[in-house]
Amino acid sequence: MKKIVLLVGASYGLLSVVLGAFGAHALKKIMSAEALQSFETGVKYQMYHALVLLMVGFYFTFSSKIENYMAWAFILGTFLFSVSIYFLALGKTWNYQVAWLGPITPLGGLLLIVGWALLIANIYNGFQSK
């Protein structure tokens, strides 16, 4: 699990830089300010959680279920949140009907909140065992 978390974290970081540059240069010319701002929100959250995944990947052993649930909540939450925002922003720009993705974004956000709550629980449990 540790290797998966670190690989996903590094991949999310790489993709957020690529997508951020794509948004700042290519999409800036064709997207509305509102759609571009949404796209940039997806990029920011992806980078924040790429860094979180790297930190937890280096810190935790993933020997407990709660550590594994935390990692999967961050991985899936980041994917659902950011990717749905990318497609919603691009859909508006290219007139694609992707409104069905609307409910996916808050689901991803909820998983991110769960990931953070489990991180707090993991840290608390670590202090309790010492």
Image: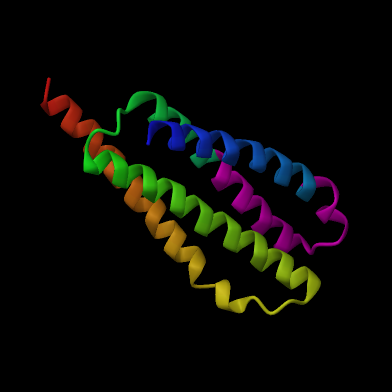
**Residue extending furthest toward the left:** 129
Q: Which residue occupies 37% across, 42% down?
A: 71
What colouring style does the render use? rainbow
Q: Is residue 40 left or right of residue 94?
A: left
Quadrant of the image for the N terminus? Answer: top left
Q: Which residue occupies 59% across, 58% down?
A: 83
Residues in magenta, as a range: 24-47
| Residue 80 sits above or below residue 51 on the image | below
Q: Give the percent coordinates (x, y) of residue 81.
A: 52, 57
**Residue extending furthest toward the right:** 29
Instruction: Give the total number of marks visible in the rendering.
Output: 0
Q: Give the percent coordinates (x, y) of residue 76.
A: 45, 53
Quadrant of the image for the C terminus? Answer: top left
| Residue 33 sits above or below residue 92 on the image | above
Q: Which residue occupies 16% across, 33% down?
A: 125
Q: Give the percent coordinates (x, y) of residue 111.
A: 38, 55
Q: Is residue 6 magenta?
A: no
Q: Is residue 84 left or right of residue 24?
A: left
Q: Majority secondary structure of the magenta segment?
A: helix
Q: Which residue occupies 41% across, 30% down?
A: 57
| Residue 16 sits above or below residue 32 on the image | above
Q: Is residue 33 magenta?
A: yes
Q: Quadrant of residue 63?
A: top left
Q: Quadrant of residue 20?
A: top right
Q: Give the percent coordinates (x, y) of residue 119.
A: 30, 39
Q: Is residue 96 left or right of residue 61?
A: right
